[in-house]
Image (spheres, rainbow, N blue to C red):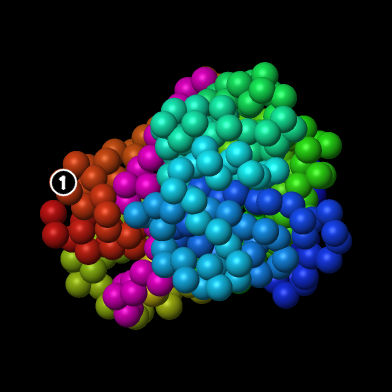
Amino acid sequence: MRRATRAGSPTQQTTTEETTMKNIGLVGVGLMGHGIAKNIARKGWKLNYLRHPGNQPTADIDELGAVGWDTAAEMAGVCDTVVICVTGTPQVEDVLVGSGQILDALRSGAIVIDCSTAVPTSTRLLAEKVAAKGCHLIDAPMTRTPKEAEEGRLNLLVGGDPEIVAKVRPLLEAFSENIFVAGNIGSGHQLKLVHNMISLGTVALIAEVAAGALAAGIDKVAMIECLSKGGSGGIALDRVALYILEGSCDKLQFTIENACKDFGYYSEMAGHAGAVTTIADAAHKTLSGLVESGEGKAFLPEVVSLLQAK
């Protein structure tokens, strides 16, 4: 993997005529996609987006000149580049080659950027279909939270043809702080699954142990202070600690069902590689049980309370 490169600052404007005149399409103006949309529009790009009930409010990006479309295909037909930011592989496939019909509508030479979290094998198959149309696909899943998305400070994990990655880098820099080029197509999604397995797995472990500790009567303030000053300290603890101490999920607005989906994708990837998944499977089982009991829409830090209630 190549060393990360630092993107332009969130306030840096895109100034070249080439980038300013390009039409960018976006499918998925959700918790993460809204920040992506705002930064693309704010930095001089001509933004188009798919109107959808799952979008966050779009008045602010409309004021920046963004244009909403009723169908993904109509939007894709006027765009040089289409960014997809949806939940996972089934949604990406549906948008691109299913009901969204983006593939059929793409102009020759158009570029598709998949910022979703997806199964790498599917990504590679989709890339072949896009290539057969005379177009290009790269994967650029992201890490960090909606806060960093709004600030234009996401981390992007990129896989794809180096020439295409270089061509879209100015666009990627519009909404990112760090760009990690992981290799060929699908490698960005591979790296994202590794990242999420470790980061979300750590959160799940902290939440489970904290639930047991609180049930045993351990003082929560003393517990957090102890953990933060030892080997358990770090971002994962900070995110769960805010919920334990203040009841807030502001540092990790990531649902249990979404985490469970990512665990499943990782297990599939690891299975193809013949890797051991004992610990991953245990965390996946805990989260799956919460989803099955109807708690999938809760945010991941809430696992602390949900496991106490069992």
Q: Residue 71, how many percent across, how many down?
A: 46, 43
Residue pictured at 42% horizontal, 67% vertical: 57
Answer few, some or many: residues within 10 Å of disc 1's Cα (few below 14, many 20 plus, some between 14 and 19): few
Is 259 magenta? The answer is yes
Front residue of 181/94: it is 94
Q: Main secondary structure of the magenta part?
A: helix
Would residue 196 appear left or right of 300 to someone viewing this image?
right
When asked about the image quadrant of residue 301, the answer is bottom left
The vertical placement of 91 against 5, above or below, is above
Front residue of 202/92: it is 92
Front residue of 117/54: it is 54
- The magenta stretch is 243-272
When asked about the image quadrant of residue 207, the answer is bottom left
Is 258 magenta? The answer is yes
Residue pictured at 22% horizontal, 47% vertical: 290
At mark 1, the secondary structure is loop
Q: Label 1 amino acid?
A: Ser
Would residue 8 appear left or right of 291 to someone viewing this image?
right
| Residue that label 1 marks | 293
Residue 253 seen from this side: yes
Residue pictured at 20% horizontal, 72% vertical: 217
Would residue 151 appear left or right of 119 to someone viewing this image?
right
Q: Residue 260, how many percent across, how many down?
A: 35, 43
